[in-house]
Image (cartoon, rainbow, N blue to C red):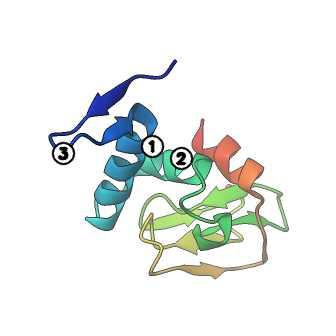
Amino acid sequence: MKPTWTTSNGENIKYEDIIDRHLKNIWSDGYRNKYLLIEMLKRGFISPKKVNAGVCKKCGEVLVSVSVHDFCGCEHSFVDGGTDCDYTRSGGEIGKATKKEILNFLSK
């Protein structure tokens, strides 16, 4: 059984709900990093379509923008913008990355 807390007004809140609220608040406050991005993706709060990611069509490397400028190993393709989902840019020959590919890349 997962722990719950009772608020001053008698509302029971599940531990997972508290974590979910906290993650959403941190994200909306603009504090974003690789680990928060992983959790937001896993919990379904962010669609993989909103993550600046792709696959280089030349070398097959998965690119996820976790810093300002991210290039693939062959330097043929890039993604830009970091974890700020409001600003995204890519160049070269980029294909779409799946949620599984994005999570695998971020888990390294």
Q: Is label 3 in contact with label 1 (beta carbons under 8 Å)?
A: no
**57 lies above or below 16:** below
**6 lies above or below 45:** above
In the picture of the structure, the residue carrying the numbered disc 3 is 9
**107 lies above or below 2:** below
Q: Quadrant of residue 51?
A: bottom right
Q: Position of residue 82 (x, y in %)?
A: 45, 66
Amino acid on which the number 2 mark rests in the picture? Ile
SS for callout 2: helix
Residue 38 is marked as 2
User: Who's the residue at 58% across and 53% down the image?
Assistant: 41
Q: Position of residue 58 (x, y in %)?
A: 85, 66
Q: Residues within 10 Å of mark 2 (few under 14, many from 20)?
A: some
Q: Residues within 10 Å of mark 3 (few under 14, many from 20)?
A: few
N-terminal of the two: label 2 or label 3?
Answer: 3
Q: Quadrant of the C terminus?
A: top right
Amino acid on which the number 3 mark rests in the picture? Asn
User: Who's the residue at 42% across and 70% down the image?
Assistant: 84
Number of marks in picture: 3
In the picture of the structure, the residue carrying the numbered disc 1 is 35
SS for callout 3: loop
SS for callout 1: helix
Q: Position of residue 50 (x, y in %)?
A: 59, 72
